[in-house]
Structures are given as structure tokens and as C-alpha cells.
Amino acid sequence: MYVLGIESTCDETSAAIVKDGIDIVSHTIASQAQEHSRFGGVVPELASRHHITLMLPCIQQTLDKAHLHIRDIDLIACSEGPGLIGALLVGIRTAQTISWTQNIPLVGVNHIEAHVYASLMSDPHFQTRLPALGCVLSGGHTSLILIHDIGSYSLLGQTVDDAIGEAFDKAAKMIGLGYPGGPAIEALAKEGNADYFSLKAGHVKGHPYAFSFSGLKTSVLYTLQKKISWTREELANLAASFQLAAFHDVYKKLSLALKEHPVHAIYFGGGVTANKKLHEMMKELPLPHFFPHHALCTDNSAMIAGLGYQVWKKKHQSETLTICPKTRIPFGL
Ligand code: KG4
Ligand code: ZN
């Protein structure tokens, strides 16, 4: 079954063709990061306009690369949220139009669930490792979930303030690095000593699995305010200490969850999982754990097509006329 996936929740316009939920036949990601970087973050209206320009060429290029025609597509899947409303509208309306005119069924998928699916896609045996822990580390979400099955999750905890990727982006801005901040912090941190500053992520009383990164972000600001001029080496120490504190917190919460829940594996997802230091630190986890392939860590449509296939297998119901964009979708409740 060939599934065309369409992604437009934020600043990545992407189309992919995935066979039977696993095999990526063709994948195109048109990133707008460059356009937004001069504003220091994503400008929602600008993102919508870029999606309009990029979406159809992106889909056409994806079909061409696969040597397929739109008639060969069996199902369309698009992100229905959470995301920027204008950006989502472009992907959804494009998907609906193709679905209606070409008579191809359409399903909407949850973008956050798809980030977790990106990691399941990297493990051919994931069905045998359920229940598992899921850990979403993205620009908009930080969640710890129990994966009972695809489509069946329980939320253990999530961030009460900034998402982890958002904290990376904000800390990077304070340190004077560009957008997106995650890769910039990772690169600078490689030159630094992570034990130089003693930083810590927040603890939410009574909620051991809840995350809080806004205090950690503010400690970067307070540290910076202590001096007027900073050398590159000192900034590298700060970036490294910030990164270590954030990932140490994730490790701590995962370790606790493993003690309390009988799971067989851990599946990571979301843009922050592109970080190699995270991979290194998570090697200490006592269970098999999986990250998405590098290209599927940040926003992409292969994970949307993959999850769309699974949703269709369960529901068999096209949403051509009913799907609508959602800025927020409860996940794992
Ligand atoms: O999952 P994603 O592409 O978009 C959302 O759904 O939010 O995540 C984007 C986030 C940004 O905050 C970006 O700074 C962060 O992922 N990110 C990283 C790295 N690459 C991207 N954070 C840390 N290290 C990285 N290498
Ligand atoms: Zn995302």
C-alpha cells in the first residue's frame, strides 16, 4: 500500500511516499528555517505563505523521485495537529483536494504520535517489545508515555512550562546563537566543559514524571548576567552545562519510569533526538532503546505516512470532508 504523507505543522514543508507503513520510497523536506532565522524564531504567517509556495512542488518532486503517478497512491495521510493553524490549513486543504479529486482516501494523524512512530519505524520488531516507554522531545512537546499499542497510550508526564526544544532555542538565543538553537547548542557544547556550571532542570512537586525547563533556561540568563563579556570557551562551557542538565533530567525520569512500569523498550521521538550527546547519555539505560533515523528526528512526512498506514488499518474510514486543523490535541490521556 503506497501512502502519501503530507506535513506542514510548523516550518517544514514535507511530502513522502511510504510503502506498508515502513519502507520509505521517496521523501522530500523543504525547510524554511533559513527564512525564519533572521527573526530568531518561526513567524506563523510567513510559515503559512511558504507552505503555499512549496507544497505542490514538494509533492510533485516526491512522486517523480519514486517514479509514481498520483493514481498509484492508495492513501493520503496528513498532520491534523498540533501545530500552527495557518500552516496546518495549507497541508490539510491540499490533502483534501487531492483526496476528493483523485478519489483517494484520506486520514489525519497526530503529529506528536507520529514522532514516536518515527522511532518505531526504526525497529522492525517493535510489535514484540510492547508495552514500551515513549519519550517525546520536540520543540513543542516533552512527554513521557506508555505505549500499549499503536493508537493506545497513557501519559505519564509532560512539561508544565517550556518544551525541551523550546528551552534549547531560547538558551541559544541568549547565548547569541542562531535559530534553530538545538543544533547550535550541540555544536558549541562540543568545545565546552559540561561540569563547569552547576545547572539543574526543575522538579514539579508531587508529579515525578512532569518536566520543567523554564527555570533551567532562566539560570542560563542569570549566569550570563553575572559578567559583561564572555569568551567563546566560557559560552561553550555554559552550552555544555545546559545540555547536560536537560538530558540528565530526561535520563532521571526515564530511570524512574522503568522502575515503576514493566516495559520492554524505550522509543524516543522529536527534533531534540537528533542530538548525539543525548544518544551517548541514553546508552546507560538498561533496556533496548530506539531513536528515529536521523532524517526522521525533526519534522518530516515519512512518519506521517507511516502512522497514516497504521491508522487506516485500524479505522478504514476516510476523513476527506471531516478533517480539520487542531492547534492542540490531547495525547495519551
Ligand atoms: O520535532 P521538531 O522538529 O518540531 C516540533 O514538532 O516541535 O523539533 C524541533 C526542535 C527545535 O526546538 C530544535 O532546536 C530542536 O528540535 N533540535 C535539537 C537538535 N536538532 C533540533 N535540539 C537539540 N539538539 C539538536 N541537535
Ligand atoms: Zn514535530
Image (spheres, helix red, strand yellow):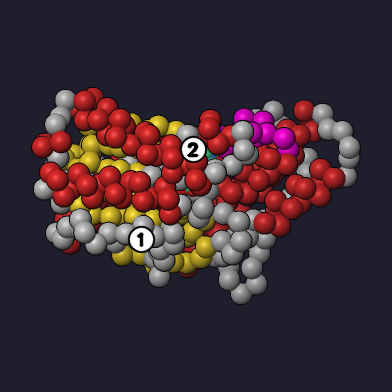
Q: Which residue is mark 2?
A: 274
| Badge 1 amino acid | Ile
Q: Which residue occupies 44% across, 62% down?
A: 328
Count the marks. Answer: 2
- Closer to the camera in the image, 318 or 263: 318
Q: Quadrant of the N terminus?
A: top left
Q: Quadrant of residue 12?
A: top left
Quick one: SS at disc 1?
strand
Image coordinates of residue 37 in percent, x first then y, are: 58, 34
Q: Is residue 126 above or below residue 230?
A: below
Q: Earlier in the sequence, mark 2 or mark 1?
A: 1
Image point 35% across, 46% down: which residue? Answer: 90
Q: Which residues are magenta?
A: 175-188
Residue 6 lies in the magenta-colored region: no
Q: Which residue: 70% across, 51% down?
A: 217
Q: Main secondary structure of the magenta part?
A: helix
Q: Amino acid at mark 2?
A: Ala
Whether the residue under disc 2 has CB within 8 Å of ligand 1: yes
Observer able to see residue 212: yes
Q: Residues within 10 Å of mark 1 (few under 14, many from 20)?
A: many
* Residue 192 image point, x, y percent: 72, 32
Label 2, secondary structure: give it: helix
Residues at marks 2 and 1 touching, judged by CB atoms closer than 8 Å? no
Neighbours of disc 2 within 10 Å: few (<14), some (14-19), many (20+): many
